[in-house]
């Protein structure tokens, strides 16, 4: 049995056999939703091979259960490329999600904004992304499946559902392009200017590897950023992880409303 099948069996034993309809990976300071799921929490330490999510602001556990009447699997802990140098660090969790029978993945992240009309506290729905970190989680994958088309990597139907949910909640949810920088250092002002020229609307250190892996596994994916700061050089505010965690709740409450409405359908 593959490792993902073994872990899926373990998870089914504890949380029940029903397939989750949505997988959710929550970003820095955006994990509150996991605590409101009516279900079973499984610490990553019980799931051999799952990453020790070492960044503060993340709770390393998988929560499976009901949220707004839907079966969900919420990954409270996300590991980032910059923690290990492995861009495929979320591969096993996503393989397990797939092995559980899930077909849809929604990701959230904290991001720096490149647009004056997306100030801190705003939400941005990813219409597309730029993998600027110079690596790819599928490097080393031997099968032909590695040649993943990325044209429709941000699912049109899920995006439409999220936009409708945002509108129903009176929350602005503009679309934009997210540019993946490796981190862990923040960008320089010159890098932010470069990202803008390349067509990005926001920058961040996550999400893109998971979207690539998600598409590799045949999952339909969508992602929402919570803007915690303007990109380096675009405002006088200081940029730090502390600042990110402090600012995330501004947008997190809106994001939670949108996600709940989306799930209620
Ligand atoms: N850059 C990269 N990642 C981020 C930022 C940023 O400005 N803010 C929150 N995550």
Image: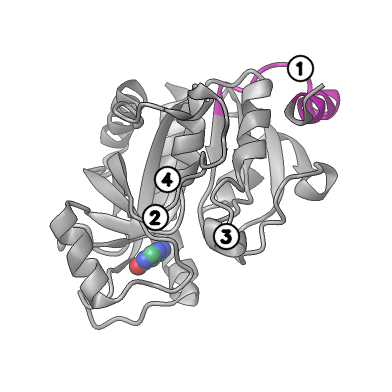
Q: What element carries label 4?
A: helix
In the rendered structure, which disc, 4 or 3, sits on the residue that comes first in sequence?
3
Magenta stretch contains residue 20? yes
Image position of 238 with respect to 33: above or below: below
**Residue corresponding to mark 1:** 17
* Ligand 1 under 8 Å from disc 1 Cβ: no
Q: What residue is drawn where x is 17% and y is 60%?
A: 196
Q: In which quarter of the image is residue 147?
A: top left
**Residue corresponding to mark 3:** 85
Q: Which mark is residue 134?
A: 2
Q: Quadrant of residue 166?
A: top left
Image position of 104 with respect to 189: above or below: above
Label 3 close to label 2 by CB (< 8 Å): no
Q: How far apart are marks 4 and 1 (CA)?
A: 29 Å
In the rendered structure, which disc, 4 or 2, sits on the residue that comes first in sequence?
2
Q: Distance between the residues labelled 1 and 3?
A: 34 Å
Q: Is mark 3 on a helix, strand or loop?
A: loop
- Residues 162 and 137: in front is 137
Rendered location of residue 110, percent (x, y): 42, 58
Q: In which quarter of the image is residue 156?
A: top left
In the rendered structure, which disc, 1 or 2, sits on the residue that comes first in sequence?
1
Image position of 74 with respect to 238: above or below: above
Rendered location of residue 29, percent (x, y): 52, 60
In the rendered structure, which disc, 3 or 2, sits on the residue that comes first in sequence?
3
**Residue corresponding to mark 4:** 208
- Residues 263 and 147: in front is 147
The magenta stretch is 5-22
Q: How far apart are marks 3 and 2 (CA)?
A: 12 Å
Q: Of discs 4 and 2, which sits in the foreground?
A: 2
């Amino acid at each position: 049995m593959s490792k993902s099948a073994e872990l899926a069996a373990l998870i089914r034993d504890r949380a029940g056999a029903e397939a989750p309809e949505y997988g959710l990976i929550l970003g820095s300071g955006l994990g509150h939703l996991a605590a409101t799921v009516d279900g079973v929490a499984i610490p990553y330490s019980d799931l051999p091979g799952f990453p020790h999510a070492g960044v503060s602001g993340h709770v390393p556990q998988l929560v499976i259960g009901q949220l707004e009447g839907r079966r969900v699997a919420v990954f409270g802990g996300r590991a980032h490329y910059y923690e290990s140098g492995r861009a495929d660090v979320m591969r096993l969790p996503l393989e397990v999600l797939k092995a559980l029978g899930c077909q849809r993945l929604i990701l959230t992240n904290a991001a720096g904004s490149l647009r004056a009309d997306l100030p801190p506290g705003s939400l941005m729905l990813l219409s597309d992304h730029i993998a600027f970190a110079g690596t790819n989680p599928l490097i080393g994958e031997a099968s032909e499946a590695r040649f993943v088309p990325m044209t429709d990597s941000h699912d049109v139907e899920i995006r439409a559902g999220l936009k409708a949910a945002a509108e129903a909640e009176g929350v602005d949810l503009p679309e934009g392009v997210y540019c993946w920088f490796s981190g862990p250092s923040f960008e320089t002002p010159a890098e932010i200017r470069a990202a803008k020229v390349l067509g990005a609307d926001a920058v961040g250190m996550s999400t893109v590897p998971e979207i690539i892996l998600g598409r590799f596994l045949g999952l339909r994916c969508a992602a929402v950023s919570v803007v915690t700061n303007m990109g380096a050089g675009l405002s006088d505010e200081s940029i730090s992880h502390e600042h990110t965690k402090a600012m995330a709740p501004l947008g997190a409450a809106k994001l939670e409303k949108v996600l709940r409405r989306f799930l209620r359908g």
